[in-house]
Image: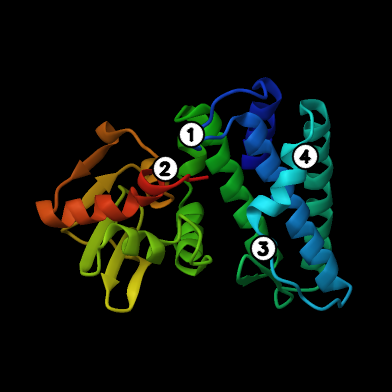
Amino acid sequence: MDEMTALAETLERVPADAPTACAGWVAHDLMAHLAAGAAEMADLIDGTLADDRARPTRDMRDREAPFVAMGDDTLRSALRAQSGRLVGALMRLAQMGDDATVAFAGRASNAATLALHGRSEAALHRWDLVGTDATSRELLAQPELTAHGVVVLNEMLDGSPECIAARSRRAGVDDLHARLASPGQPDVVIVADDHGAHLWIAEPDGDPTVVADPATRLLMLWGRRHDPARVSWIGPETVCAQVCAVLEAPYRNTRAA
């Protein structure tokens, strides 16, 4: 099952007031987030293709507010409509070739990258609704979602709670080199120094700091709460503590959604 279908089927069966893993959000708020994100991305693509002057991505809370105010049935219809708009916009952008990009949330992305971002959002937000079931484990374990997450977490706007550099600052960590390993996949390396914090993908090394299954590792990278029983901390205690502090910063300090 693909990420979008899995998310759509989940949204069909959850009530508007269902709790989510995003602190302070119920399912209605999450649907508003998804509808607003699809609308904003479609608007930016349409503007770019029309040769309009590029505008900054609107603040998340501002663009979500009209959708949050909708009733449940209206919001569900709006989410379907905006998702359809985005699919059409991405198809038109793809027809312009790989060099055609749109500025979204501070990053210039082509159609393939934006589509991958949508897949990642769908998989993560489905997990926010239902947790780690078999479908979540399958979807979140895909290596391309981890590779995409590494790029986005490095490049996303500094004010975003998941931004890896911002998380390192909030945690007070400025001297760190650690490896997050998952069996059968490349390592994710996290480094913090005088220039800030960043992530990269590397070939597996014999001395990882932490080992987790791929789905759990992706949740950790995005600052989601995870099952501690699925994580093995095997590096030096001080290094493990620093990694924990950085990765857990979103839900220790603010909403991670």
Q: Earlier in the sequence, mark 3 or mark 2?
A: 3
Q: Which quadrant, please, contains the N terminus?
A: top right
Q: Earlier in the sequence, mark 1 or mark 4?
A: 1
Q: Nearer the viewer, residue 27 or 136?
A: 27
For the residues labelled 2 and 4, say whether their Cβ atoms are less than 8 Å apart: no
Q: Which residue is denoted by mark 3 in the rendering?
A: 112
Q: Residue at x 63, y 37 (%)?
A: 30
Kindly report which numbered mark, 4 or 3, lies closer to the viewer in this rendering. Answer: 4
In whole angstroms, how far apart are the C-alphas of marks 2 and 4? Answer: 24 Å
Q: Earlier in the sequence, mark 1 or mark 2?
A: 1
Report the amino acid beneath label 1: Ala
Considering the numbered disc 4 on the image, is that residue within a helix, a strand or a loop?
A: helix
Q: Position of residue 71 (x, y in %)?
A: 79, 29
Q: Which residue is denoted by mark 4 in the rendering?
A: 79
Neighbours of disc 1 within 10 Å: few (<14), some (14-19), many (20+): many
Q: Earlier in the sequence, mark 4 or mark 3?
A: 4
Q: Residue at x 59, y 23 (%)?
A: 18
Q: Which residue is denoted by mark 1 in the rendering?
A: 21
Considering the numbered disc 2 on the image, is that residue within a helix, a strand or a loop?
A: loop
Report the amino acid beneath label 3: Ala
